[in-house]
Image: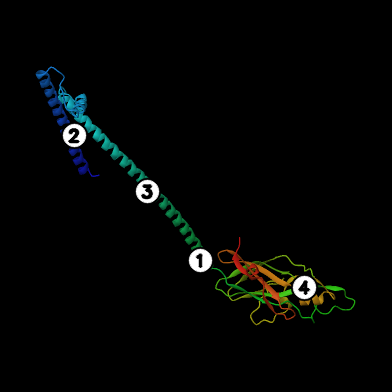
Amino acid sequence: MSDGYRNGAFALGLTVGGGIVLNLVLWSAYRADKAREAVTQSPEEPQSHPWVEPWDWIVTTFITPNDTLAQWGMALLSLAAVYLLWETLKASRQTLKATREMARETARIGGDQIKASRDAVAAAQVANEVAANQFKLGFKPQLVFHLGGPYVDESVYPLKQILEGEDSRWTHIEVSVEVENIGDHPATITKFFIGTTGGKDISFGGWPQQEAYVRLTPGKRIFLNNSIGHFGDSGISLGRANLAHAGGFHLSAENRDTFLDNLPKVFGWIEYVDQLDVKRRMGFGLEPINRTGRVKTWGADEYNYDREVT
């Protein structure tokens, strides 16, 4: 409600109220004069119309001709004060309602701003992590494994036929594992491990992980074996010096064919660091193709990976 409308309504109400009160006063005076005339003309009880008597009682109870101007002024001012108090209470109520709505809106905006701030912080953290990972990946060496099959030449010791009078012989499970750096950044190999899993009716012993310190520069290759540091190239003819021991068992006349028909699966890994001293582990898994000397990848992502480690 505008101030102009409120002031106009107040003025109209004051005028109408004043007119009503003035008419009541005039009516009271008129009735009083009529009553005196009636008493003068006839000392008996004056008679009036039935509907006038209740009205006279109501008017003369609250209004009499003897009321002074000051009394009427106070009455009118009291009415005005009551009206103004009523309007003030209404305005206060509306202000309180508006204040509550403003407080709710402020709280909502504050909550949205807090959420937006948290989202911005989270997004910044993700962006920083992505940038840091991209920076580290820019120095990551690109290494690959070249895997060769087990040593299964049956004419060569220790897999040649068991001799007469020979109960068994200790036999190494040997594989060719070559690591090549095909990227632009060097890597330093610090540890490696090669072992076996599976096999049928044969228990294979193994070797613990090996310590190493070999710097593999771009374009270089290295064979993993007990004398790590033996370098080769893509045209080298692999001999026993380039084979790594993955395990061993006691070969006998009874288990020889079982072993050759169920060659164990081989897995392993290397640990290396890059120029930023970020340590990574790279793994492989291979499955021999029986009695062919060839292998195929085995173990999926569980054994074939290249990831950062702590």
Count residues near mark 2 (Cα–Cα under 10 Å), then give few for <14, some for 14-19, many for 20+. Answer: some
Looking at the image, is mark 2 or mark 3 nearer the viewer? 2
Looking at the image, is mark 3 or mark 4 nearer the viewer? 3
Element at badge 2?
A: helix
Q: Which residue is mark 1?
A: 134
Instruction: Give the image quarter of residue 297.
Output: bottom right
Mark 2 and mark 1 in contact? Answer it, CB < 8 Å. no
On the image, the x and y values in percent for residue 165 come to 90, 76
Q: Which residue is mark 3?
A: 105
Marks 1 and 3, how far apart in space?
43 Å
Please name the residue shown 38% across and 46% down the image: 104
Q: Check disc 2 and give the amino acid type.
A: Gly
Mark 4 and mark 2 in contact? Answer it, CB < 8 Å. no
Instruction: Give the image quarter of residue 170.
Output: bottom right
Please name the residue shown 67% across and 71% down the image: 285
Q: Which residue is mark 4?
A: 172
Mark 1 and mark 4 in contact? Answer it, CB < 8 Å. no
Count residues near mark 1 (Cα–Cα under 10 Å), then give few for <14, some for 14-19, many for 20+. Answer: few
Which residue occupies the foreground of this view, 128 or 17? 17
Q: Check disc 1 and give the amino acid type.
A: Gln
Q: Check disc 4 and give the amino acid type.
A: His
Q: Earlier in the sequence, mark 2 or mark 3?
A: 2
Marks 2 and 3, how far apart in space?
43 Å
Q: Which residue is mark 2?
A: 17
What quarter of the picture does the C terminus occupy?
Answer: bottom right
Please name the colour scheme applied to the rendered image: rainbow
